[in-house]
Image (cartoon, grey):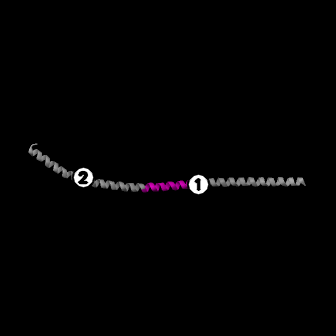
């Protein structure tokens, strides 16, 4: 009778060991799959971040170019105005020089 009980206990222990081994194997597979999925997700997130970063850079470059164009246009207008003013001043300077030459100074 005791032998039968010992055999049943050993049988139960072997079944428990098999259940534990199966559970460990399954948990390893689940963990490996989770790591794999996490790596894929991280890869997708990185790609999306790169795309979004490129879009932000392109948008900022367009804004910077537009601002640079405006600055260039304003500079060209200023240059023209300064050129016109300097021409007026040249006329005055020439008149003064001629006057001084005529006066003999």
Q: Tell me residue 53's x, y (percent).
A: 48, 54
In the rendered structure, the answer to whether residue 49 lies left or right of residue 90 reads right
Q: Write down the residue under mark 2.
A: 82
Q: Tell me residue 105's x, y (percent).
A: 11, 42
Q: Write down the residue under mark 1.
A: 40
What is the magenta segment's predominant secondary structure?
Answer: helix
**SS at mark 2 in the image:** helix
Q: In this picture, which residue range is highlighted in magenta?
A: 42-59
Give yes or no for residue 54 being in the magenta stretch: yes
Residue sitting at x 62%, y 53%: 36
Which residue is situated farthest in the left direction here?
A: 103
Q: CA distance from mark 1 to mark 2?
A: 62 Å
Residue sitting at x 12%, y 47%: 98
Q: Residues within 10 Å of mark 1 (few under 14, many from 20)?
A: few
Choose the circle earlier in sequence order: 1 or 2. Answer: 1
In the rendered structure, the answer to whether residue 66 lies left or right of residue 20 reads left
Of residues 3 and 65, the one nearer the viewer is 3
């Amino acid at each position: 009778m005791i032998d039968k009980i010992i055999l049943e206990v050993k049988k139960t222990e072997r079944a428990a060991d098999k259940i534990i081994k199966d559970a460990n194997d399954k948990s390893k597979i689940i963990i490996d799959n989770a790591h794999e999925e996490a790596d894929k997700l991280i890869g997708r997130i990185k790609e999306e971040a790169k795309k979004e970063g490129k879009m932000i850079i392109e948008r900022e470059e367009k804004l910077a170019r537009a601002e640079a164009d405006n600055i260039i246009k304003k500079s060209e207008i200023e240059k023209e105005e300064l050129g016109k003013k300097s021409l007026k001043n040249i006329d005055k300077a020439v008149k003064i020089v001629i006057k001084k030459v005529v006066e003999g100074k």
